[in-house]
């Protein structure tokens, strides 16, 4: 075929701030494809903005779109027999959803994201999304006035693009580079830079090179590449949501990814970056410091990456990152001077989370790495927020929010509002939060999510009672409830499953098929229905 048909999957819409520039990216990709001899054809992918969906029923419809995006893209690409694809995602679920689709369809594919937004500036300090949510908590606590809050509202997120810190969207766009599915700069070049348009043109041109060489996603997204991405995840201090999405991507290529893989990799991988919300640097700073490739070069020189993994450049990881120097050791710490000797994420297990829970330990205050306190138990996010803002949560408490898991939610809502309220109320270094739901990448503090098994299927988190002592030990990877086995067995005997919160529509269908958070909340046909 002289002019191969190249599908360009556009995540553009007018409601998601991080996607409002994607039409410009798509036009540049089309030019690149045509310049290189292909026929570009655009079709859409849906997208939800987690920031807008936060704090109400809309958040139940966020994670579930990952699988809708994967399924619909698979349908379009296969039905129309595209020869190659260029995926144009940006915010949270589009990146993993399209990576899952790429693995399924397995035609030559390149990713180019819409790029991160620039940091905001309030009172001389750089800001990001979490600054806004925490400002709401500070206002509730009487620490700032309404004029201050309005300034945050107007200045915190000043441009289009994905939120300016190492939140879920930027985490996944950076990990796309680490996986080998995006070109250099995919995760870090700001959305408003002309360099982003240049990158998009090159992505369109490069997919034609992959087509000619017959390099496909499953040649790139191997087990070794996924473990490379997990290593980079630890060094960057990525969102806990990566521990939902990497297992789901791995599942599509036939790799049974256990989240417990994270701990041995974390134990040997130093945390080199403290981007917001963990610190006071932002995606624009990481880009100027050398980007993801500079981080990978540090890791490669320490022998922590497999250099032989193929990438969309047609070259290996080792060839790509060679000579990519770290230009700012304050933004990317050298391997011999890390923020910590261990990685940004940890998986905790114990009698409260037999199958694991995930914490972004790089964003946990030192004094909360080991903590014991009484459980304050809530069966939904709304009740927890009311208690926090009502001043009913005090120093030392462990807030437990359950029945918010993949099945129980359904949809596994993000708990950014509660964690931001805790921080805004001045409790970020004294109060922990544990949930079978998940967190935004903007969450910080002792926030432990994805607790598995979830409450809806009778996991131990369903048996916690008000005042039970919860023990958290992040260095030892432990999460326990200090209640005897006999007492837990007695509580289990009395426990009854809850009636589903949603019984109609897509959420009901999703709840019937979704698996636990520790498996990446992938969808499976129930055995009884096979």
Image (cartoon, rainbow, N blue to C red):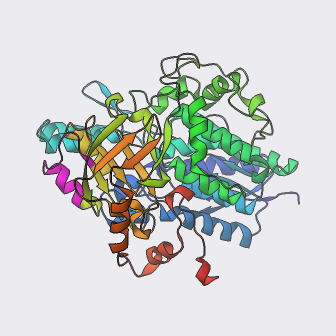
Q: Position of residue 507 (x, y in %)?
A: 44, 73
Q: Which residues are magenta?
A: 383-398
The answer to whether 515 is drawn above or below residue 6 in the figure is below
Of residues 264 and 47, the one drawn nearer to the viewer in this rendering: 264
Is residue 205 visible to us here? no
Q: Position of residue 471 (x, y in %)?
A: 35, 44
Question: Which residue is pictured at 63% across the width and 44% down the height?
Answer: 176
Q: Residue furthest front?
A: 486
Q: Is residue 344 left or right of residue 431?
A: right
Question: Which residue is pictured at 50% across the width and 39% down the height?
Answer: 345
Which quarter of the image is occupied by the C terminus? Answer: bottom right
Q: Is residue 37 left or right of residue 293?
A: right
Which quarter of the image is occupied by the N terminus? Answer: bottom right
Q: Position of residue 508 (x, y in %)?
A: 45, 77
The answer to whether 174 is drawn above or below residue 106 in the figure is above
Asked if the magenta segment contains residue 458, the reply would be no
Is residue 278 visible to us here? yes
Q: Is residue 468 left or right of residue 486?
A: left
Of residues 40 and 261, the one drawn nearer to the viewer in this rendering: 261
Of residues 72 and 34, the one drawn nearer to the viewer in this rendering: 72
The answer to whether 497 is drawn above or below residue 270 in the figure is below
């Amino acid at each position: 075929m002289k002019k191969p048909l190249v599908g360009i999957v556009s995540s553009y819409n007018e409601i998601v701030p991080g996607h409002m520039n994607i039409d410009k990216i798509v036009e540049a990709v089309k030019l690149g494809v045509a310049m290189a001899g292909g026929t570009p054809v655009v079709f859409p992918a849906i997208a939800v903005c987690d920031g807008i969906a936060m704090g109400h029923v809309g958040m139940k419809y966020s994670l579930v779109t990952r699988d809708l995006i994967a399924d619909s893209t698979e349908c379009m690409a296969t039905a129309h027999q595209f020869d190659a694809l260029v995926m144009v995602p940006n915010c949270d679920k589009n990146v993993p959803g399209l990576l899952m689709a790429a693995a399924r369809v397995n035609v030559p594919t390149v990713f180019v994201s819409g790029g991160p937004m620039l940091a905001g500036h309030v009172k001389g300090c750089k800001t990001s999304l979490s600054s806004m949510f925490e400002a709401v908590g500070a206002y509730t606590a009487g620490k700032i006035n309404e004029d201050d809050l309005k300034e945050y509202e107007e200045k915190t997120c000043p441009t289009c693009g994905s939120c300016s810190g190492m939140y879920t969207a930027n985490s996944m766009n950076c990990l796309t580079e680490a996986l080998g599915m995006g070109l250099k700069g995919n995760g870090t070049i700001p959305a408003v830079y002309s360099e982003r348009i240049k990158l998009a043109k090159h992505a369109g041109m490069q997919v034609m090179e992959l087509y000619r060489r017959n390099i496909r996603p499953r040649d790139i997204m191997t087990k070794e590449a996924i473990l490379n991405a997990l290593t980079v995840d630890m060094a960057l201090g990525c969102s806990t949501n990566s521990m939902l999405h990497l297992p789901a991507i791995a599942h599509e290529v036939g790799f049974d990814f256990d989240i417990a893989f994270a701990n041995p990799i974390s134990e040997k991988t130093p945390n080199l970056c403290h981007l917001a919300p963990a610190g006071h640097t932002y995606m624009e700073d990481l880009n100027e410091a050398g980007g993801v490739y500079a981080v990978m070069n540090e890791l490669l020189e320490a022998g922590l990456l497999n250099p032989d993994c193929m990438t969309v450049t047609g070259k290996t990881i080792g060839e790509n990152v060679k000579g990519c120097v770290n230009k700012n050791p304050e933004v990317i710490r050298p391997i011999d001077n890390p923020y910590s000797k261990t990685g940004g994420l940890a998986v905790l297990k114990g009698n409260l989370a037999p199958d694991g829970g995930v914490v972004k330990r790089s964003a946990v205050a030192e004094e909360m790495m080991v903590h014991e306190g009484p459980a304050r138990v809530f069966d939904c996010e709304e009740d927890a927020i009311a208690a926090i803002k009502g001043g009913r949560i005090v120093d030392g408490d462990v807030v437990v929010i359950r029945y918010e898991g993949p099945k129980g939610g359904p949809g596994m809502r993000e708990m950014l509002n509660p964690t931001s309220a805790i921080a805004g109320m001045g409790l970020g270094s004294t109060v922990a939060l544990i949930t079978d739901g998940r967190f935004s990448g903007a969450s910080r503090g002792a926030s432990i999510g994805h607790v598995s098994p979830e409450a809806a299927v009778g996991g131990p988190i369903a048996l916690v009672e008000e005042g039970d002592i919860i023990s958290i030990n992040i260095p030892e990877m432990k999460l326990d409830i200090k209640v005897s086995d006999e007492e837990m067995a007695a509580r289990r005997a009395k426990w009854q499953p809850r009636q589903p919160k949603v019984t109609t529509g897509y959420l009901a269908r999703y709840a019937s098929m979704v698996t636990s958070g520790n498996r990446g909340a992938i969808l499976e046909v129930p055995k009884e229905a096979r």
